[in-house]
Structure formats: C-alpha cells, structure tokens
Image: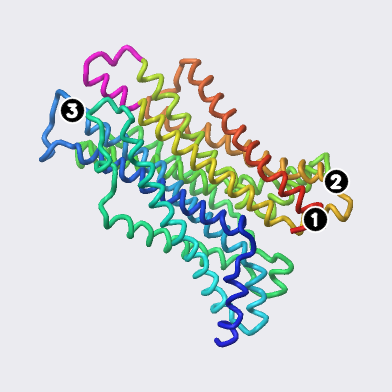
Amino acid sequence: MSALLASAPLLLRRRGALADLLPVIAFAAATGITLTVLGGAAAFVGRLPDGGEVVHTGEASVIPFLVTCAMVASVLLIPSAVGLGGSAARLSLARREQDLAAIRLVGGTATQVGAVAVLDVAAQALLGGLLGVVLHLVATPPLTALDFGITPFTTADLLMPWWAYPLLVIGMVLLAAGSATVSLTGVVLSPLGVARNSRTVRMSVVRLAIWATLVVGFLVFAQIGSMVLGPIAGEAVVIAVMVALIGAVVAGVNLVGPYLVWLVALLVARLAPTPSLLVGARRLAADPKAGWRAVSGITFALVIAGFLTVISLMTRGDGFRGAEDLMMATAMSTGGLLTLGIAAVLAAVSTGVTQTARVIDQAPLLRSQHVAGAQVGQLHRSRIAEIVLPVLLSSVLATFTALLVVMAVLGGAPQDPLVALQYIASVLGAYALVIAAVLVGSPLARRFALRGA
C-alpha cells in the first residue's frame, strides 16, 4: 500500500490542460442539461389541476397533454445526457492508462490501481457536476422568455428544489465511478498490456437482437396496447408505457450502433480501395464503441429532428382553431424547438469532445505513421474515413427510428413533401457539425504528426 500511495501522484498529475478539460466539459454539459430538462418537466407537472379534476376549457384543459409531451421530451433527452456523462468517464480513464501501468510496476495490484483510477474519474465528475449546476442556474432565467402559449413560467417554476442539486451531482459522480469500473474490465492493467494497447473488443449479435425485440414490442403495443391495457389500467398507464417504449427504442440505437459500425468497418477494411480508407476502417473495427460515441449525439439529434418536423407540420394544420388549440399548437412548436436545441447542444458537445479526445489518444500513432512515410494529408483522410462510416450509419438508423415512431403514432407515414425537405435540412446540419468537429481536431492532428504529443 505504501508503494501505491507513493506512486499515486503519477496518476493524479495532469497530463495536459486540454486532455483534462474535455471530460469536465462533458460532465458539466450532462449535469446542466439534465437539471434543465427535469426542471422544465416539473414546471409543467406543477400546473396540473388540483385533485386530478378534468377541465374542458382554458389553460388547465391542455396542461395534461403538455405534461405528456414534457415527459416524452424528458425520456428522450435525459438518457442521452446521462450517456454523455458515462462517455466522459471512459474518456477520463483513457487518459490514465500509461500511469496505471507505472503504478503496477511499483507494486500496486490491479484492484488498488483500479480504485485510484476510479477516484480520479469521480473527482472530475464532481467538478463537472458543480459546474453543470452553475450553468443550469445561469441558463434558467432566459428560458422564462419562451412562449408556450400559456401563463409564462417564472424562474422559481423552472428551478429544482434545493435538495435535488446535491442528489444529482452525487448521482453523476456515482455514474462516472460505475462507468469507469465497467471500462476497467476491458483494459489489461499491466505494463505489457497497456504498451500493446491490449483491449477486449466484445461485439455480439445479441445487441441487434435486443434492439429488434424493442422495435417489435413497440410496434405490437402501438397496435393493440390501447385495446388490451386501456380498459384494465386506464389511458394514463397506456400513455406511460408508450412513452417508456419510445425511450427504449431511441436508447436502443446506441446499443445496436457499435455492432453495426463493427460489421461495416470489417467489410470496408476487406474492400478498401485506398490506404486511407483501409486505415480508418481498421481503427473503427478495433474500437467500434469509440467510433459510435463520436456520432451518438448526432444520431439522437436527427431522431428529435424527425419528430419535430412532423410536429411543426401538424401545428400548421387547420384543426387548430379555438383558444385551447392555439395554446397547444404554440406549446408543441416551442417545446419541439427547445428539445431540438438541447439535442443540438448535446450533439455538439459529444462530437467535439469525442473527436478531440480521439486525436489526443492517437498522438503517438499519428507521429509513428508520419515518420514511417505517411503524409499529413493521408492522415487527415484516414480520420475523415473513420468518422464518415459511423455518420452514414447514424443517418440511416436515425431516419429509420424517427419514421418508425411517427408511423406507429400517426398510423402512417407523413405525405407532405415538406417533411422530407425539413428532415434533409436537419441531416445536412448534422453533417456540418461533424465537419466542424473534424476541422477543430485537424490542427492537433497535424501538430502531433509533425512534432509528437
């Protein structure tokens, strides 16, 4: 134990301002967005009529439906935000593998080294969580200016109870510690294992089977759930189950995504006509989870964009005539745009942080490839190939998921061509975000190739 304590500074020392800042940014974004979404949902719940009475006119008549919409948005946004926190934990752990091996050399056991590494990740999560609370408090007052067609919310309405803030920060720390612990099971914590980058890549067809089961279950429930469960448990339970299934299907995209990336990468590596494409595909096949994490936020944003496109067309229909209908149309439109905005922030943070981190991770490899004769332009093209494959897959999965949910809820595919045009615009925006993330990391890649880390 004395050897472990003596060597702990090797692990806790900072390896670089940028590398250490990225996980903190991700933790802060995850905490701030989760608090903001929960605060907004709680504000709508607080407007429900007392005693569960049914009101047929005025603002109170549309609040139950708006609460349902807020719950759907929460189910869609919160898992993605929490997933960003888990990704940040794995990212922080990746920064420490060389130091973990050094501590093993001076006598630390795998359990002891793992414990110190998890504590380091938890400390970064704590710092990011506290910053996220500050971001939430700063962002909440401007949100009161949004027009939902009902009585405007106050800052007090959108803030969480005081006890919720330490609970959520503690939850984020526990999530980070748990995610880091799970990640350690795939890392060989020995000097030779780290030097060889020995990592277990487990991709199973079970991922595809689970997601297919979720999709089939959602489709079956959408068709017969109301008839079977409605008379027994009531309409509220049917809506709650439907919301939960929608969230499960959307979350399942991140389960099946890495498996599909792995399959496509293996296929492309066999058929690649150029060295850059071959290198990019082999990198993806070696670490498909990291490749998918780089575009998971964009996938989620595209799913939300698909929902929003249909909602925006619905709210422009002739069916919205009375005051209550106008309230509902305004609330749905504003809420949809807000949800898409939050999803875009998640996508931007996730893509930017992940892409920059991958460049930092690959610094020794970039340098060795350049010394071996690879031109900087070829290295850039291999990075582009490494991100293009997951992006194309994410577009297909997001389009399929959004169309699946919309068809199940509306009873058919939207016929208006504006749906396709608006969604294509969203896809192009997602691609622009990916290009921006690649461009941000390009100067780093060039520097590491020419001069090393």
Name the amino acid, label 2.
Answer: Gln
Mark 3 vs mark 2, foreground winner is 2
Between discs 2 and 1, the one toward the N terminus:
2
Image position of 324 (left or right of 8):
left
Q: Residue 193: x percent and y percent?
A: 69, 71
Q: Residue 52: x percent and y percent?
A: 13, 38
Circle 3: element type = helix
Q: Which residues are magenta?
A: 317-332
Q: How many marks do you count on the picture? A: 3
Front position in the image: 264 or 446: 446
Residue 61 numbered mark, or none: 3
Between discs 3 and 1, the one toward the N terminus:
3
C-alpha span from label 3 to label 1: 65 Å
Q: Which residue lies under the disc numbered 1?
A: 451
Instruction: Indicate whether residue 421 is drawn in magenta.
Output: no
Circle 1: element type = helix
Front position in the image: 134 or 262: 134
Q: Which residue lies under the disc numbered 2?
A: 375
C-alpha span from label 3 to label 2: 65 Å
Between discs 3 and 2, the one toward the N terminus:
3
